[in-house]
Amino acid sequence: MTKIRVLIVDDAVVIRRLVGDVLATDPDIEVVGTAANGRIALQKITQCNPDVVTMDVEMPEMNGIETVAAIRKTWQKLPVIMFSTLTERGGSATLDALAAGASDYVTKPANVGSVTAGLETVRRDLIPKIKALAGRAEGRPAVLPPAPRAVALRPAGEAPRAAYPVAAPIGAVDILAIGVSTGGPNALAVVIPGLPASLPVPVVIVQHMPPMFTRLLAERLNSQSAVTVVEAQAGMVLKPGHVYIAPGDYHMTLQRRGTDYVTALNQAPPENSCRPAVDVLFRSVVEHFGGRTLGAILTGMGQDGLRGSEYVKDAGGQVVVQDEATSVVWGMPGYVAGAGLADRVVPLEGIAAELVRRTTNGRVATGSVAAAGVSALRM
């Protein structure tokens, strides 16, 4: 198998050398060139024909955002991974770069405290993303055996479920839970603005992002959408037509408080190497809403959301996933579809309409999501 050809673009020679040294240790990756700014990078792409480009955000002459936009005019499918700083300015610039067409981002090694930590950051975060975006990560998702349950959701004596049909009948829905990772900010920028202010259910989301980035994402989506979008804080009452995004580095769950359901946050160990994790959120949603849960799994690396989707289906709920053609990485949605858990596989541009169709079902939004309104949950 040929090696993955990588072009490194950064104005700091130390970063170019650090990233190059780490990538050179992986037998599947070959560094085919470096560039100190965007203008040079555009020339090098033609010369080196890379499979993946790593890109700094702030560079002289032509910055990363401008370079990504220029790349997309000629090379629409070339994966570009941004190096981002964990600052408000860096987070905002990263979202701008993603909106301009960047595929993903990682934390810039210079901001992790030491050379050793920087090397480990590149090895742990950048290499898997390079392989995933180059189509070398895990191969096609396969059907996996069901995970063991701490609490059985199937009635005693019931046979294991069979594969679900492509379009299952639509039942009553009281909550929408979304899980997304690589390519997520752009996917959410299509889906969330497509939801009406009159959406009769609340929406809870796990997007794999670091602290502060999730707040910036929520603020950006809120400015573009009819629904209200916020980064979740502990104790927020779930309301129809409102979207709650789990904050970076915190798992989000739900709790019942009187007649309401509220958000809860914790820093329990990561699951699927993620915190927040989709599986954690989906399990909690099913605990409270059972078969009236609608789950959606969008573009992303890995398997987070697979076990959570099993819980949704075992409780009698519904799951919609993004299709392979429109996903930046068809890992998370691909595993759910491959396990026979998807009621429908939908292109990105059709997901909002599908979610509205399944959540509305003749209903209108009123007040908060009261416990009294979900007494008939199927568990």
Image: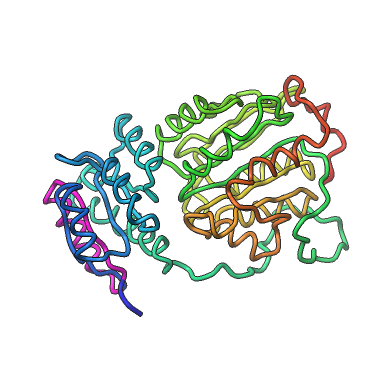
For this orientation, the residue located farthest to the left is 13
Is 294 located above or below residue 167 in the figure?
above
Looking at the rendered image, the quarter that the N terminus falls into is bottom left
Residue at image position (61%, 26%) is: 227
Q: x, y percentage for residue 368?
A: 72, 22
Q: Quadrant location of residue 237? A: top right
Tell whether 253 sits left or right of 162: left
Q: x, y percentage for residue 41?
A: 20, 53
Q: Quadrant location of residue 340? A: bottom right
Tell whether 284 sits left or right of 181: right
Residue 337: within the magenta?
no
Residue 19: within the magenta?
yes
The magenta stretch spans which residues? 4-27
For this orientation, the residue located farthest to the top is 367
Q: x, y percentage for residue 111?
A: 24, 41
Tell whether 372 sits left or right of 132: right
Q: Nearer the viewer, residue 131 or 356?
A: 356
Residue at image position (86%, 55%) is: 155
Q: Nearer the viewer, residue 1 or 375?
A: 1
Q: x, y percentage for residue 162?
A: 79, 66
Residue at image position (49%, 47%) is: 269
